[in-house]
Amino acid sequence: VSTATDQLTNLVDAPDRFDHSAAELRQTQLAALNERFGERRDSIKLLGHRAREAGVTEIGSMAGVVPLLFPHTAYKSYPESFLTEERWDRLTKWLGTISPHPISPLSAADISGVDDWIDQLQARGHYVSCSSGTTGKSALLIASDRDMAWSRKDTVNVFTWGSGVKPEQDRRIFGLAPVASVPKNTVVAEAQLAAFGDPTKERFRLPIPPITVGSLTAMVVLRKKIADGTALPDELAAFDRTSAQRQVAVDDAMIAAAEALIEHREEKLYLAGLWNALYQVAGMVRDRGYSGKDFHPDNCLYVGGGLKRAQLPPDYQQFVHQTFNIPADRDFQNYSMQELNSGMPKCQRGDRYHVPPWVVPFVLDEGGDTLLPHESGEIEGRAAFFDLSLDGRWGGIITGDKISLDIAPCACGAPSPSIRNNIVRYADLQGDDKIGCAGTVDAYVRGLS
Amino acid sequence: MTVTDALDTAVSAPFFLRGELLEGQSAVHRSRDLGVDFTTPALALDRVVHPRTEVPPLLNVPLDEIIDFLVETGERIRDPRNIFVQECIELMTATHVLPSAVLHEQVMGAAAYLDKRLLHTVVEQNFPDPRALDEWVPKQDFTGRKSFVRAFAPRLIHVLPGNSPGVAVKSIAQGAMVKAINLFKMSSSDPFTTVAILRTMAEIDPNHAIVKSMSAVYWRGGDDTVERVLYRPQYFDKIVAWGGGDAINNVIKYLGPGFQLVSFDPKTSISMVGKEAFASEDALDAAAELAAGDVMVLNQEACVASRFLYVEANESDADRFCERLHARIVAKAAASGDTRPLDRDLREEIDSLMMLDDEFGVWGSTDGKGLVIRSEEPVDFHPINKTANVVRVDSLDDAVRYVNVATQTVGFSPAERMPEYRDRLASGGAQRIVRLGDAGPSTIGNPHDAMYPLHRFVHWMAHEDGVASPAGA
């Protein structure tokens, strides 16, 4: 029998998947949410706890899901000492409270570090990705084989729909982002390469060592030691030297990227990166006397993530597009986050991010406690989603983003719910004006952010 | 939201500029804590600075007269007919996290600071010779060189905190006693108290030099268009700032020769409970009651409020302590009518610990009615809003390593063991050690934040007066 969840996730390859309106999907989505809840309430310990506290036994309406959505911070709620003191058995146990699939115990003695812990979990079919938290804790997101397979498919579909580029294996791929080597990023990069890369042309990768979770958490560990007062000056000096060396390596790698781009400028290119790196490398290409006219007119650009608080001039996107001769109708952008498994591509004509049928969008009040009434048109508030495709963890997430969601058809013609291209993080909205005498040692740790 | 929309719902927060009330609704601001809007007049920058060509108005007003004025201010604050204070508490209830009864008690408690003996004691503790505030005090060193020294009236900006309205009263009194020209930058969670007190003062005598030395305004902390202009040594000598993180980082940008920071740092307070607390049921009840009192100072919004309690016990004894502590925190929370729910992020962290129940003990739930967590080392998060973290230790010696540069008050039991620990606590960074249950009160005039603040506020000025003729010459 086909479940409601299957009905929705089976649309993954459907060319008309964005042709379903919110009203048309509502009943199926509600049924699917109930299926998901029924399957997971006993297997995800945190979900069971949440449901008991809220007294939820069944989902009768969209508003009824809200108490069961996890804030994005749920994935960084592990005690940090489990990580900093390498208590892998404990960290595994914590992971078990958010995973629906049982995790067989690992022998802590056989684990040499966080990267090894992640590798050993992966060997057992648990894929742990980590968000590179700018300060403090990283989110640890667990996923399953099914999720990895879904990401492979979804990322290609999203890019094709959003950019109009067909997966015809006819491009030289340039990977220009120093991104963390976590399973989710690796799978996406592999899938993009297989779909769009010319198998006879070697992919360009930044010539730097992979950024492992271990190297990211080294900073977290050091920060904790500074706060505790146990870090010694030589240790800080060594950390600074390593950071400086890494920066030099990244800068050199960018030069190598610019030179390789110039070398291959007449080929059809696929550039992948983050805006900051793309902007930097575009500047180098211009400095060397090359610009749009020198590049292939059918190039494309895959951008992941937002600005990550990088300070760039207002016309940075235009600058990158023009440098690499990216056609105007190839302005690809995707709204997603590590916590979700699916992407929401931006359309060209309406300039809006489209929500696929297997992702249920919710607009909550700023506090994230209440579903805002939404019968028609566009409303603004805190974004929450339920990604029905997620298998290895709970699909419901409350984000830190402020969005405007419209349930009327978009100017591009697609009737699916869509999100205006003006997403901001609540955290970035207001300067922190509140001060008090009570505070934490965080205010006494300088230079690690 | 547009200005016109906000005006219908926003409360109005007037400014006070050297004796004059300035009302207006030119700007709409947001109070972060409760998401309420308030309106203020436009900031008249020229009116908040006092030209250096004119000596400060309070310079030659005797300290005794200043203290008398402050004492009368205190009486008027406590007077139930004082319309300014009543209004202020009502308005604050709309923008502050604390319930109105707690706020009322705060303001009344702060007014008790305006006591003649108390204020004299504060001055005497801060200055070896308080006459230096009133006059040029003659000195002579052992070589015969003579001089006069004056604790000269400074120009101060006070960046006030938002968590304790009582600080407004204290800051006004301290600013007045050092005869400063004072600019109070109010916080978004309390843009009212300072002005209410200054209005009360202006009612006593609108032309008094104290009133002419005080201004209270609001701008959003970190607003460069204001701070770049005002934070200069040509206008002010010192900036007296509370808090850490962004609040202080914004200020630090402007420090330089002639413009110094006196910082009241963000602090965490803790408790240490020795094994003696488990000697009997009565001893345990007593320790739990005292500890709960320290946790619940200002419903745990204050820096002196305990957050981490190191308990010298085995796990089952620690759990007995937790159970009793929890019951008392819940009772105190209920009595104050404070049922604010915990922040979402804090709820997440605590829920996670509840899942790991083979390692952590949790008493209560995340409903904001009071919560105790027992662990083997301090939790990652900052316990706030009636949340106590009991950390079990084999010996209080093991707790000393958790004292750090952010530690303020250590509530200690039993009192007899305090001398054994105080040197190590100070070395770790702590600033006060008190008997358990005694976190709130302190000896009048004692150092705060490891300094005598009034001594740092003033502009120490020397008048060298040559060498005395040798005796018998």
Image (tube, rainbow, N blue to C red):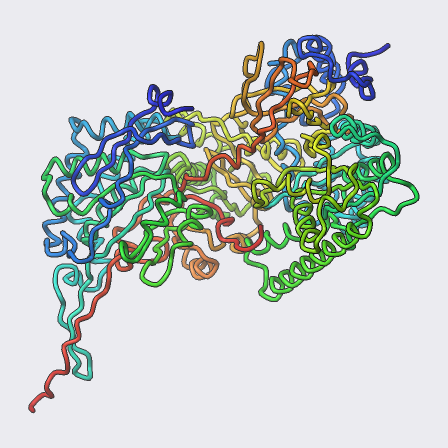
Residue at figure coordinates x 49%, y 32% from the top left: B326
Q: Is residue A195 left or right of residue B155?
A: right
Q: Give whichever of B244, A449 is nearer the camera.
A: A449
Q: Give whichever of B289, B126 is nearer the camera.
A: B126
Kindly give the residue lying farthest to the right in the view shown.
Answer: A200
Q: Is residue B137 left or right of residue A382?
A: left
Return the x and y of residue A429 as percentages of the image width and height. 50, 34
User: Quadrant where the N terminus of chain B lies?
Assistant: top left
Residue at figure coordinates x 75%, y 34% from the top left: A142
Is residue A110 visible from the viewing direction of this image?
yes
Q: Give whichever of B106, B413 is nearer the camera.
A: B106
Return the x and y of residue A121 as percentages of the image width and height. 81, 40
Q: Where A119 falls versus A375 (above or below)?
A: below
User: Quadrant where the C terminus of chain B lies?
Assistant: bottom left
Q: Quadrant of residue A358?
A: top right
The number of discs equals 0
Q: Where A162 falls versus B208 (above or below)?
A: above
Q: Quadrant of residue B256?
A: bottom left
